[in-house]
Image: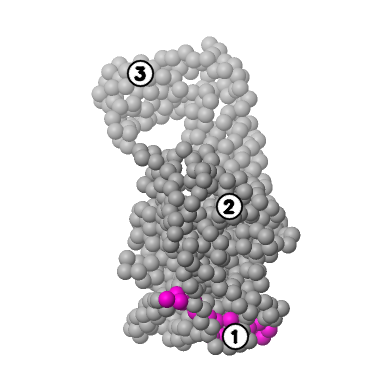
Amino acid sequence: MNAWLRSFWLLMVLVSTLPAGAQNTVLRGRVLDAETHQPIPNAQVGVADNRIGTSTNDDGRFALNIPPAYTQERLTVALLGYKNYSRPLPPLPGPELVVELKISPAALGEVQITGSVLGIVREAVARIPRNYPVRPTQLTGFYRESDNDPAGQPRYLAEGLLLAFKEPYQRRTAEGEVQIKQSRKVDLRPDRQPIRIDWAGGPFIVHLGDFVHRRSQFINPAHFKDYDYRLAPGSTFQDRPVYVITFAPKAGNRRADFEGRMYIDQDSYAFLGAEWHYTPAGLNNSPNSADSRALRVAYQFYAGRWHLKTVWWQTKARLPIGPPLNYFGEFLTTTIDTAQTPRPGYTERAQYRDVFLHNAVAYDSAFWQGHTTLLPSTALQKSLFDQQRQQQTDSLFKPAEAGTDPQQKQLSAFDRFLKRFSYGSHVGAWPLDVPAAGLTVAYAPAGSGLQVQRTARVSAQDLTIITQFEYQYALTRELALSLATQRLYRQFKGDGWEVGLSYEHNFNSHRRPLYGRAGLGYIRQTVGLPLGTFDNPDAGLRVSGTHLGADELSARIQTVSDALRPSLGLGIELSHKFELVADASYLVPMRSKTQLQLDEESGFFLFRSSATVDLPAAAVDLRVNDQPTTRLPWQQQPWLLSIGLRYRVR
């Protein structure tokens, strides 16, 4: 533990000074305000017309990995409100380069326009196909996420190198492929925390935060009527004038989800970036509840088009269980590839419901060498070091476990259970052959005034619908124990259950998984015909030893069948969490009986009693087509077909 902590702290402190690899060199620098000499965060640092680049951290520092082919290119540093900085790259390796940015005078003046402010936004939206990529683009970028406690101390820190596949911007979308090339985590949460709720979909902020690509509500013409747009004092970016436009819900409007400001280039009408937060209405309309949600997004110019540069995302939420969530995620584009790159295959793609924190690989003291990353701030480094030092102190009082990796903490019993647990729902055709028939049932228990008598008509049908809810617990990678409940619909009513084993084998391990499925279950199913409700004159009525004291009883005549159910089927993975399954089963009958069931219809539902009378019974008269019998007219058939959806919790 101690050696690992020292190694990690050394990495965090020295990451900006380490060489990038045998072939590449690292340009280290710091960006300051020329007048105040204060560090400037979020400045865009680019080389070779932004083919590669990074951004400054909260301390104004950056480290950019320079390939040999780019050593003769120019370095540019840009930020809204400052004059553009450009110079040839200095000889590398070398000392830390200090860049001083001067405020642009245009940032202090008012922008003069003709026409409406909304007209500027409309024009910018109309020019999206002209200003943004019209063919697929791949971004290489660095991603970081954390969850902080109320004091601002990170509970965990996870970092990753991503490949993000971007669709052309003519089509409105918030979707796209993300491939996690490398990742690591520093988990500072208590070892024995019983329940952990981890953030899913974090790396997808590269698509979800791209407000131009997804045509977020505040630039969606369908919602222009919901917003009030105003012109703020102008600014500049890369020495070009910029419209600064604020947007907020119109007075009394409850359909506007966002409030903030956006930046639009005056010459090209390109969206250069925006910063916004969710309104109370937006938080209520969001599918994921949160107390606050804020974003900041910026774009950069390369090869005649504007590309996503950075996404900053923060969400705060009180969770049903566990501590409050204070999620912070940021994405930084470091390389832009406009060639016709192939989409990553299914097995290489991350899924939205995957928890990025679970994807961390073993720690490596040279983990990010050879890659451009967003440097951690001094405050973050100190916070991590203080917590790790406390963990180191605490570990002195705990016996060390041989062979344990500090990064791979022991899962709680609850987490181990969830890792093996899945559930799903199915709909199927229950094999029931039903001829048309007349049915008469009479029941008069001895010593009671209860009279159950009803004539019903059974309609012919070849198909009865059944729904099933199934729970599975994986015993091995391919073998699972299953428990399911069933319910019948249409003219018959009935409930059932099944317990068994299921086996699943992946036939397509290198692409989207295609599973062969086999199972064997023991099933009990009730098929009943409701007979209506009847008054109960006897408060002390007992049927088959069960007291039925309610004033009103319902009755149905039913069959109860036990069977073995072998099955074969196929499953295809829709995502890492969801699987579409289809099964064909053969019912091997074991036993069946006919019953009259009586249920109490009043009282608290948890305390309502039911009783059954097995036929033949002297008190029950059953007739089918006016002929006395003890068998109901419908017949169980062997084949059962079903289709369903399974969900894996972890």
The front one of 187 and 37 is 37
Q: Residue 476: x percent and y percent?
A: 57, 61
Amino acid type indicated by mark 3: Phe
> CB under 8 Å between callouts 1 and 2?
no
Element type at mark 3: strand
Q: Which residue is mark 2?
A: 269
The front one of 637 and 60 is 60
Amino acid type indicated by mark 2: Tyr
**Whole-number angstrom distance, CA of label 1 to CA of label 3:** 86 Å
Vertical relation: 638 (above or below) 13: above
Q: Earlier in the sequence, mark 1 or mark 3?
A: 1
Q: Residue at x 61, y 27 (%)?
A: 463
In this rendering, position of residue 176 left or right of residue 594 = right
Q: Residue at x 41, y 23 (%)?
A: 555
Q: Answer yes or no: is residue 645 visible.
A: yes
Q: Which residue is mark 3?
A: 534
Dot 2 surroundings within 10 Å: few (below 14), some, or many (20 or more)?
many
Q: Which residues are magenta?
A: 17-35
Q: Residue 232: x percent and y percent?
A: 43, 53
Vertical relation: 341 (above or below) 112: below
Front position among marks 1 and 2: 2
Front position among marks 3 and 2: 2
**Whole-number angstrom distance, CA of label 1 to CA of label 2:** 40 Å
Element type at mark 1: loop
Amino acid type indicated by mark 1: Pro
**Whole-number angstrom distance, CA of label 3 to CA of label 2:** 76 Å
In the displayed orientation, state which residue is furthest to the top: 626
Q: Which residue is mark 1?
A: 19
Dot 1 surroundings within 10 Å: few (below 14), some, or many (20 or more)?
some
Q: Residue at x 44, y 46 (%)?
A: 229
